[in-house]
């Protein structure tokens, strides 16, 4: 939690100063700012001081190594210092810091921090998911019909846009609401909190889902790829939802595609 706060301190300092001229165009619809890079540095330095043998994977730095050489431990911190960068740069107040811990090939902990609300979402395997001091559970919505979902447009995978819009079309026909707020980490955190009944997106990166996937599972939800497996780590296609909603959303997606057809 303190590492997330260290990164957030940088972001809040820039929040009233940044404009779009302070960002570099990293790719179509994918911005990276000085605040983003400096926030990641603050997080890594905090964790490195407390866990010198650990390794790091971050959106801005890729695999990051200590000055004296890469950590040799089995623990890997997966960091998105600013999830929702475009929102941040446009002063749309939906963005977060996301930090996940992977140990021995398994995600074991996650933190998603929303600095503007001082909302700290925390989960650890076997210990549940929490928002500040309140324990979280996914919603009790049992069906896709009448559910309230979150999603994100596949801006890193525009070749899948037609497929995504066909799924989107069928989803909005049965749900009571579908929101695209622009921070996958927060979408998963709010799914864990029962605000959203579920979330789906295509072509995400590991740091987009690392912490949020732990939150949803520890809150009693189900997280999978588009075929019900664990390939959302490598392929980036994810469904996270309350159990009944997850099953029906997966069935709807299967009418259009399956994980193996997206390779």
Image (cartoon, rainbow, N blue to C red):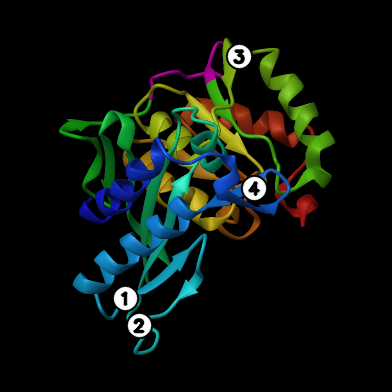
Above/below status of 54 relative to 38? below
Disc on the earlier residue, 2 or 3: 2
Determine if residue 196 is in view. yes
Q: Which residues are magenta?
A: 139-148
**Within-10-Å neighbours for mark 2: few <14, some 14–19, many 20+:** some
Q: Main secondary structure of the magenta part?
A: loop
Residue 175: numbered disc: 3
Secondary structure category for the residue under label 1 = loop
Numbered disc total: 4
Asked if disc 3 and disc 4 are in contact, CB closer than 8 Å, the reply is no
Where residue 185 appears, x then y in whole percent? 45, 41
Q: Which residue is mark 1?
A: 54
The mark lying in front, picked from 3 and 4, is 4
Disc on the earlier residue, 1 or 3: 1
Front residue (pair 232, 72) = 72
Asked if disc 2 and disc 1 are in contact, CB closer than 8 Å, the reply is yes
- How many angstroms separate mark 1 from mark 4 (CA)? 28 Å
Residue 30: numbered disc: 4
Secondary structure category for the residue under label 2 = loop
Front residue (pair 101, 49) = 49
- How many angstroms separate mark 1 from mark 3 (CA)? 43 Å
- How many angstroms separate mark 2 from mark 3 (CA)? 46 Å
Q: Which residue is mark 2?
A: 71
Residue sitting at 47 percent across and 19 percent down? 142
Above/below status of 220 relative to 234? above
């Amino acid at each position: 939690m303190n590492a997330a706060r260290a990164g957030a301190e940088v972001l809040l300092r820039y929040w009233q100063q940044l404009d779009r001229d302070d960002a570099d165009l990293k790719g179509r619809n994918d911005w990276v700012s000085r605040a983003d890079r400096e926030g990641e540095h603050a997080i890594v330095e905090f964790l490195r001081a407390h866990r010198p043998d650990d390794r790091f994977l971050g959106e801005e730095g890729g695999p990051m190594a200590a000055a004296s050489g890469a950590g040799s431990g089995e623990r890997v911190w997966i960091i998105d210092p600013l999830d929702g960068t475009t929102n941040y740069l446009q002063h749309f107040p939906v963005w977060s810091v996301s930090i996940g811990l992977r140990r021995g090939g398994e995600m074991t902990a996650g933190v998603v921090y929303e600095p503007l609300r001082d909302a700290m979402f925390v989960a650890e395997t076997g210990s549940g998911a929490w928002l500040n001091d309140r324990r979280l559970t996914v919603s009790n919505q049992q069906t896709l019909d009448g559910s309230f979902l979150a999603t994100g447009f596949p801006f890193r995978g525009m070749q899948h846009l037609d497929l995504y819009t066909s799924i989107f079309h069928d989803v909005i026909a049965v749900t009571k609401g579908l929101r695209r707020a622009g921070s996958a980490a927060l979408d998963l955190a709010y799914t864990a909190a029962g605000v959203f009944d579920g979330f789906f997106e295509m072509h995400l990166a590991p740091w987009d889902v690392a912490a949020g996937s732990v939150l949803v599972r520890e809150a009693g939800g189900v997280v999978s790829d588009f075929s019900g497996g664990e390939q959302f780590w490598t392929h980036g296609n994810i469904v996270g939802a309350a159990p009944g909603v997850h099953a029906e959303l997966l069935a709807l997606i299967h009418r259009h595609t399956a994980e193996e057809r997206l390779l």
